[in-house]
């Protein structure tokens, strides 16, 4: 286990050392968990890397774009069926 002393600012901000960020693949967000021993920081998985078999389908699209595409398809189907 690695121990590193970090400083906490007046705003409660602390910098996670780069070697730990790299090792645990921490990018933008972590989950802060209150434990009996202190605060545990756990990396939050990146949704872009967690899509499994649908990864290629969603590549390069935001959730807003995916919703827009789905709505467009629904509108086309409704027009074809006279709704």
Image (spheres, helix red, strand yellow):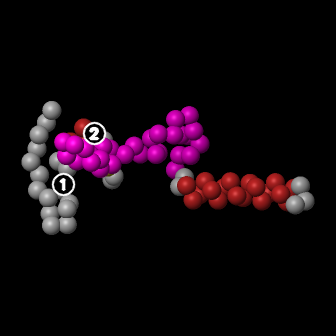
Secondary structure under tag 2 reads loop
- Can you say which quadrant of the picture contains the N terminus? top left
Residue 32 placement (x, y as % from top left): 29, 50
Residue 6 lies within the magenta run: no
Q: Which residue is the extreme one toward the front?
A: 36
Please indicate whether residue 61 sits to the left or right of residue 42 in the image. right
Q: Position of residue 22 (x, y in %)?
A: 25, 42
- Label 1 crowding class (10 Å Cα cut-off): few <14, some 14-19, many 20+? few
Residue 51 visible somewhere in the drawing: yes
Residue 10 higher or lower than 35, as above or below: below
**Whether residue 40 is visible:** no
- How packed mark 2 is, by other alpha carbons closer than 10 Å (few <14, some 14-19, many 20 or more), is few
Residue 68 in which image quadrant: bottom right
- Residue extending furthest left? 5
Residue at image coords 52%, 50%: 60
In percent of the image, x 87 and y 56: which residue is there? 80
Query: What secondary structure is found at the residue carrying circle 1?
Result: loop
Give, as a single range, the part of the protein colored magenta. Answer: 31-60
Q: Residue furthest bottom?
A: 10
């Amino acid at each position: 286990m690695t121990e590193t002393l970090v400083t906490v600012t007046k705003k409660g901000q602390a910098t996670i050392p780069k070697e730990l960020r790299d090792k645990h693949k921490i990018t933008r967000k972590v989950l802060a968990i209150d434990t009996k021993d202190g605060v545990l920081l756990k990396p939050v998985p990146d949704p872009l890397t967690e899509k499994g078999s649908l990864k290629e389908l969603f590549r390069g699209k935001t959730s807003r774009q995916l919703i827009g595409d789905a709505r467009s398809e629904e509108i086309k189907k409704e027009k074809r069926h006279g709704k």
